[in-house]
Image (tube, rainbow, N blue to C red):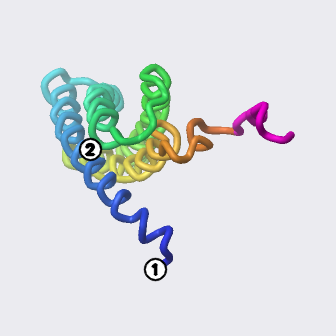
Amino acid sequence: MPAPIRDRLPRLLRELAKFGTVGGVAYVVQLAATNLFWLVLDAPPLVGQALGVLIATVVAFLGNRFWTFAHRARTGLGREYLLFFLFNAVGLGIQLACLGVSVYLLGLDGPLARNIAGNVVGVGLGSLFRFYAYRQWVFPDAGEPEAAAPGPQPESAPRASEPS
């Protein structure tokens, strides 16, 4: 195994384990909230799913910011919160697409089918996207400032002591 990969692997695995733990807690919160909205409050499928995800997102942000990625650069609470919710909105879109296909295209609308489509398949695919996005843009590595925000970065001006 190449040295750069071998040296980074332990940290990546620690982050992945913490991300999974935080995600597991947020997942339980999301399952409970979503099913509460569906079964107790009789919310429509997509509304109940969206509200459950919103509640779980707050739990996930706190766990990821203060535990999973606590060792990474702090780029400002407002910026991190905004990007976290933006990328969670994309993850929610992935989740809702899975649920929508199941309910509205395939006609699988029972509680089990909803949970499998939205809370297993949708969460799994959305989580892969979220982990990448959080590491890359929300909580960038302190040693990689170019990963601080998506898109092109402005070039910094040379210091007086540096040749132009």
Q: Quadrant of the C terminus?
A: top right
Left or right: residue 108 versus residue 2 is left
Would you say residue 1 is visible in this rendering? yes
60 shown above or below 132: above
What amino acid does circle 1 point to? Answer: Met
Residue at 33%, 47% (x, y): give it.
123
Q: Position of residue 26 (x, y in %)?
A: 23, 38
Range covered by the magenta-colored residues: 152-164
Contact (Cβ within 8 Å) of mark 2 with mark 1:
no
Q: Helix, strand or loop at disc 1? A: loop
Left or right: residue 45 versus residue 88 is left
What amino acid does circle 2 point to? Answer: Gly
Residue at 29%, 33% (x, y): give it.
66
Q: Provide the residue designation for mark 2.
A: 23
Alpha-carbon distance for marks 2 and 1? 29 Å
Prevailing secondary structure of the magenta residues: loop
Q: Position of residue 47 (x, y in %)?
A: 33, 26
